[in-house]
Amino acid sequence: MQGIDWLIMLVTGVLLAVWLYRRFYVWLHEPPAGRIYLLGEGGELAPDDEHIRFLEEAGYEVMSGKHRVPIMIGLDGQPLRSRLFIDYVVEKDGKTYLVKTARERMPMDWTGSGVRDRLFMYALLIPSAAGILFIDSKEKSIRTITFIIGEPHGGDNA
């Protein structure tokens, strides 16, 4: 090999090493939300949907319909399948919200533990969302739920 070949190989190797280092550095320092589940397109929006009309009347732009998030569970080595549903994804004032709709057969328990048990998984699944909207079109109510993890005032439980 001639000297120029060694120089080209050396430059190529250095560039590859720099690129690999930068990719690893970015991956290591990116927020965990960058590694969280990304929603697909979602279901089609029906023009006569009462929930969509209600959200639009309240100033929200409905971005997509129902999202089905598949979940694989291992239980004692046996695979189980489940899924989570997000009814809508909406936007208002540049903020994105996940929407869950009220269901008669599943009334909401409006206590801290009830809200946590029913909705916290959505905040963990899509942490980039500004919150979760729980809407009841019949009652004409929209409740905004946000979660803050940790002590609200930095207290110590020791």
Image (cartoon, rainbow, N blue to C red):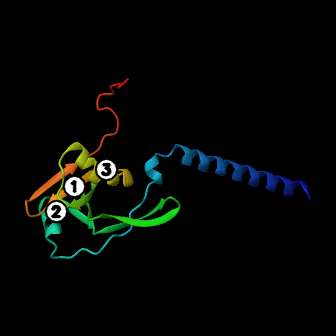
The kind of residue on which mark 3 rests is: Phe
Q: Secondary structure at mark 2?
A: helix
- Badge number at residue 98: none
Which quarter of the figure has residue 148? top left
- Point out residue 95 in the picture as x, y percentages from the top left corner: 27, 53
Most extreme residue toward the front is: 76
On residue 120, which mark appears? 3
Q: Which residue is at 44% across, 54% downward?
A: 36
Relative to 154, does residue 130 appear above or below in the rendering?
below
Q: Position of residue 119 (x, y in %)?
A: 28, 53
Spatial CA span between label 2 and label 3: 22 Å
Q: Is residue 24 visible?
A: yes
Label 1 secondary element: strand
Tell me the tag on residue 133: 1
Q: Secondary structure at mark 3?
A: helix
Can you give x and y, in whole percent of width and height, for residue 65 in the image?
27, 69
Observer able to see residue 130: no
Q: Residues within 10 Å of mark 2 (few under 14, many from 20)?
A: many
Instruction: State yes or no: discs 2 and 1 in contact (Cβ < 8 Å).
Output: yes
Q: Residue at x 33, y 70 (%)?
A: 42
Nearer to the camera, 113 or 63: 113
